[in-house]
Structures are given as C-alpha cells and as structure tokens.
Image (cartoon, rainbow, N blue to C red):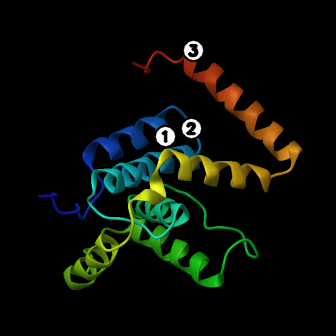
Amino acid sequence: MVSPLPAMPEKQTIDRARRDAELGKSASTQAGEFVREQIEHIRRGHHGARSTKQAIAIGLSEARRAGVKLPPPKPGTTPKATRQKAVQDLKRGLSPSRPSRTRSRAVIQALKKEPRATVSKAALARQTHQAAARRTPAERSAAARKAAATRRRIADNPIVE
C-alpha cells in the first residue's frame, strides 16, 4: 500500500531550500527542491501527473506556498490564470493558512488517476531539452556564467557540508 500524499512539503525539502537561500542561491534554485520532491512522489507512486510540466508546476506552487520568493511568470509567457495562481500562492506563503481538507482530498484523488511515466528520465530529458531550445544562445550563456559564479561562491563558503 502506498502511503498517502503529505499535505505539506517534507521537512528535509524545506531545510534544503532554506540552506539554498542562506547560500544566496536564486529563488528558482530554492524552488527546485520542491520540484525534485514532487518528481520523487510521482516516481514512488504517491500520485501522478498528466505531463512533466504539471509536475513542475505543482512543485513551484508548493515552493511559493512554503515562502520561497519566486516571482510569478511574466505576462505573455503563460496564461493569465497561471499568473493569478502564482500570485495567490505567493500571498499564501506570506501568511499561514490551512487548506480545505475536502479540496485537498479531491486534488489528491484526481492526481492518483494520472500516469507516472511523465517523470521518467526520458520524459524529463525531453522537457529540459525543449525548454533549453526556447532560450536564445545569449540567455543560455548568461545562465551558465551565473551558475559558474554561484559555484565559486559556494566553494568559498564554509557552511557547505
């Protein structure tokens, strides 16, 4: 029997995201911990996702609700409803509130019916490749330079295990 989906992110996930924040890493890096958690949940069979993008979106939403200051997507890049949901999640992250038990159960039951193959290594690689292809060479180069600068900062930081 598969254990039920936790209502909140796991403590280790929040701790890893907090450590990323202390190291000065970007909000998207902090949110990546929550996305990783969702992928693990789907792989373990807690629930499924209709697409790889949905799995990522669930993780980002959870990150915002947990207090990661991840800005909503820019207008024109996603539907208006997606931006509104991101703003709503950010507000929820600022003030603690309890989710509706009925709604949570309904969401979990719906997700349990979704496929698990959407977070296979091949599916994630395909999604990553498509996302990279949408960026310009200059954007990819800037991201690589930023990552290199972060690596240097981490190497100098004694906090890292």
Q: Earlier in the sequence, mark 1 or mark 3?
A: 1
> Type of residue at label 3?
Asp
Kindly indicate the quadrant of the structure image that contains residue 92: bottom left
Looking at the image, residue 2 sits to the left or right of residue 27; the answer is left
Q: Earlier in the sequence, mark 2 or mark 3?
A: 2
Q: Secondary structure at mark 3?
A: helix
- Residue designated by label 1: 21
Q: Secondary structure at mark 2?
A: loop
Above or below, comparing residue 155 to residue 33 in the picture:
above
| Distance CA(mark 1)–CA(mark 3) | 16 Å
> Can you say which quadrant of the picture contains the N terminus?
bottom left
How far across and how far down the image is residue 115, in percent? 39, 66
| Distance CA(mark 1)–CA(mark 2) | 6 Å
Q: Secondary structure at mark 1?
A: helix
- Residue designated by label 2: 25
How far across and how far down the image is residue 2, in percent? 16, 58
- Residue designated by label 3: 156
Q: Can I make out residue 63 in this image?
A: no
